[in-house]
Image (cartoon, helix red, strand yellow):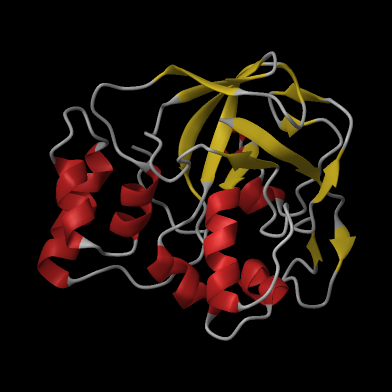
Amino acid sequence: MRILSVNMGRSVAAEWAGQLGRTAIDKRPVQHRVPVGVNGLSGDERADQKHHGSFEQAVYAYAREDYDWWEDQLGRELRDGRFGENLTTLGLDVNGAFIGERWRIGSAVLEVTGPRVPCVVFRNWMDEPGWVKRFTEAARPGAYLRVIEIGELGAGDEVAIVARPEQGVTVADWFRARHGNEDALRRILAVPGHDARWDEMAERVLVAGPPSGTDEQAVTPTA
């Protein structure tokens, strides 16, 4: 398990980038080692600080294996960083990671906090018909991480899983449950110590049906 690519970007003006009109989704691979602080990779920017600026979303990881799957689906090449991720991984089941799982990469330690949920900027950036729906149905969202120990990392670094809950909520189940999948929600409810907000969601989903909307501004449980 290793980091295939470290990707960073700058905030730029874009008419298609929602109400803010700016985005840093265009992440590009860098060759140098990168310092990691509590707010993410040094030199990387996030334009929408209101919805993407929290410490819980300091770093975004996506698996090369999931890119390869998407290439078959879309019939086009997808370079590392195309989805706006900071870390493109190889050999790591990002979507199967538990919320709270910790990875040591280089000298930094990162903790999985949840999945990426597609938004209007991502939809417009990809320019694919029905992109939000397709991304949601595929349930290959990648994972957000927060920084537990600052350090530095670079392409080629191994990913070591240094802590993992004995029982937990996977990134994929979090994502599916957030979008109304009853089986995923029931798996989460069976995990001891799960966030009480999942119980609130269960009352709505299992009785009234799945929540509406797929934007990242929704308030959702973390684990």
Q: Position of residue 115 (x, y in %)?
A: 47, 48
**In the image as oriented, which residue stretches furthest toward the bottom?**
129
Residue 119 seen in the current view: no
74 left or right, relative to 202 = right
Residue 220 seen in the current view: yes
Q: How many marks?
A: 0
110 left or right, relative to 221 = right
Q: Position of residue 108 (x, y in %)?
A: 66, 17
- The quarter holding residue 138 reads bottom left
Residue 192 position (above or below residue 204): above
Residue 153 position (above or below residue 18): above
Which part of the image, by quadrant, shows the N terminus?
top right
Q: Position of residue 204 (x, y in %)?
A: 18, 62
Residue at 53% in and 38% down: 91
Q: Nearer the viewer, residue 103 or 202?
A: 103
- The quarter holding residue 167 reads top left
Q: Position of residue 88 (x, y in %)?
A: 66, 44
Q: Nearer the viewer, residue 165 or 204?
A: 165
Q: Nearer the viewer, residue 203 or 34?
A: 34
Q: Nearer the viewer, residue 176 or 96?
A: 96
Residue at 55% in and 41% down: 144
Residue at 32% in and 58% down: 176
Residue at 38% in and 54% down: 175
63 left or right, relative to 211 = right
Which part of the image, by quadrant, shows the C terminus?
top left
